Amino acid sequence: MIQFETASRRTHTLAEADPEVAELVTEEDRRQRHGLQLIASENLVSAAVREAVGSVFTDKYAEGRPGRRYYSGCEFADQVEELAENRARELYATDYHVNVQPHSGTQANLAVYLATLEPGDKILAMDLAMGGHLSHGSPYNASGKLYEAHFYGVSRDTEQIDYDELARIAEEVQPKLIVSGASAYARFIDFARFAEIAKSVGALLHTDMAHIAGLIAAGEHPSPFGHADFVTTTTHKTLRGPRGGLLFCKQEYRKKVNSAVFPGMQGGPLMHQIAGKAVAFREAMTPAFRAYQQTVRKNAAVLAEGLSQRGFRIVGGGTDNHMVLVDMNGRTTGAEAEEALRQNHIYVNKNLIPFDQLPPSKTSGIRIGTPAMTSRGLTPDDFAEVAQLMADVLLGETTDGVARVEAICARLTTA
Ligand code: DSN
């Protein structure tokens, strides 16, 4: 066993210090490089983000806010957190207050609820089974245990949000807070309409933009800023930062939100993650990031078109963002499709589709996303090939799926 070594006095590699963990890191790296990562909520961070996340900030306690900490020695933590905050506001061209401390999107959502609701208050959010998220009132999550959750969904005909029906439910329920945002919804979300509906019933509006945060930053999806009272997101999906959360609010909620995050919801902020967020926000303000987000959307559109041509039904009639929801049409369950693709080194997740008759462990659909493979350099032409490859696997029409995946990965510059 190698004695404890600090980074600055390091003479041994991870492989020497801890061969078991080193081996798992190597295996995961190999899995990622030699597969098609098409999970809609995943992406790849830059080397700069990873370096910041692996920095000495991991060692620092900084409970409190910049300039008002409960620990000494926070002068550089203060600066990095302020940098992250300023960049986050600049990225979304907003004068909202921002808190970069939430450890995750769920923590950010729970902080909004804690800041605005009393236990038992009513919230209205998208049904998990229709594309919502666990932290939007699911009975398995604190949001559904602490608050009275009501749900809206999508229309049976279009599989898109029915705003008239949403308005009707809001009128009937009289929620204190309406949540807009989804984790399995491929069409644009009309935040202006959400705001109108919230206003008409005197509810606050919260947007969870986790999946589409990068698209919004790049102007590739309508923005919730100016419409929602609270905007939360994760930082690691289309936004392409380190794993974590982010919370914006109108200035009038600043104090309540800050104390809901700390001490309400969390202890010390993860300063290494915050350093990584600051780097990612800077990257997201570049023309290259905007071009990347345009390609993410084009790639999703090409993928949907290719799968549709092979007979797969695209839920919602298409895609406006980075994801494609596919109905397996009873050929297989979503779980079986996920496994067939995984055996060919193609990674997606099984997903409920609207009005699904199967349980979440099986599902009738799969969710596919383009952010990670677009980060690795796949173009629309490549995605046309990926669509055919996936269809071949799903229809049992290929025996060399692994080799075809390998050939795609081999030509990527970042492979
Ligand atoms: N469940 C994650 C997703 O994949 O969308 C978000 O928490």
Image: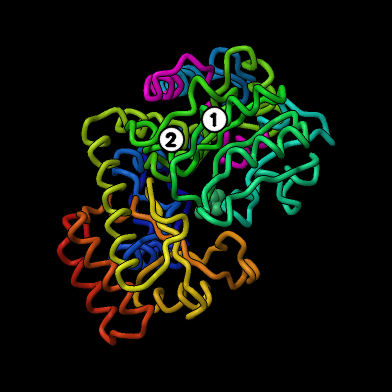
Give the quarter of the image for residue 266. top right
Badge 1: residue crowd in 10 Å (few <14, some 14–19, many ≥20): some
Tell me if label 2 and label 1 are in contact, CB under 8 Å: no
Q: Can residue 17 be spotted in the picture? A: no
Badge 2: residue crowd in 10 Å (few <14, some 14–19, many ≥20): few
The residue where tag 1 is placed is 193
Q: Which mark is residue 295?
A: none
| Residue located 42% across and 56% down the image | 317
Q: Amino acid at mark 1?
A: Arg
State which quarter of the image contains the C terminus: bottom left
Mark 2 vs mark 1, foreground winner is 1
- The residues colored magenta run 84-110
Query: Is 297 included in the stretch rendered in magenta?
Result: no
Q: Can residue 308 be spotted in the picture? A: yes
| Residue located 37% across and 38% down the image | 215
Left or right of 140 on screen, residue 7: left
| Tag 1 secondary structure | helix
| Tag 2 secondary structure | helix
| Residue located 64% across and 17% down the image | 253
Residue 203 image offset from top left, x and y in percent: 70, 25
- 35 vs 362, nearest the viewer: 362
- 142 vs 168, nearest the viewer: 168
Task: Give the alpha-carbon distance from disc 2 to disc 1, as whole Å.
Answer: 45 Å
The residue where tag 2 is placed is 56
Residue 13 image offset from top left, x and y in percent: 34, 56
Compared with 130, 255 (above or below) is above
Compared with 128, 279 (above or below) is above
- As drawn, the residue found furthest toward the right would be 120
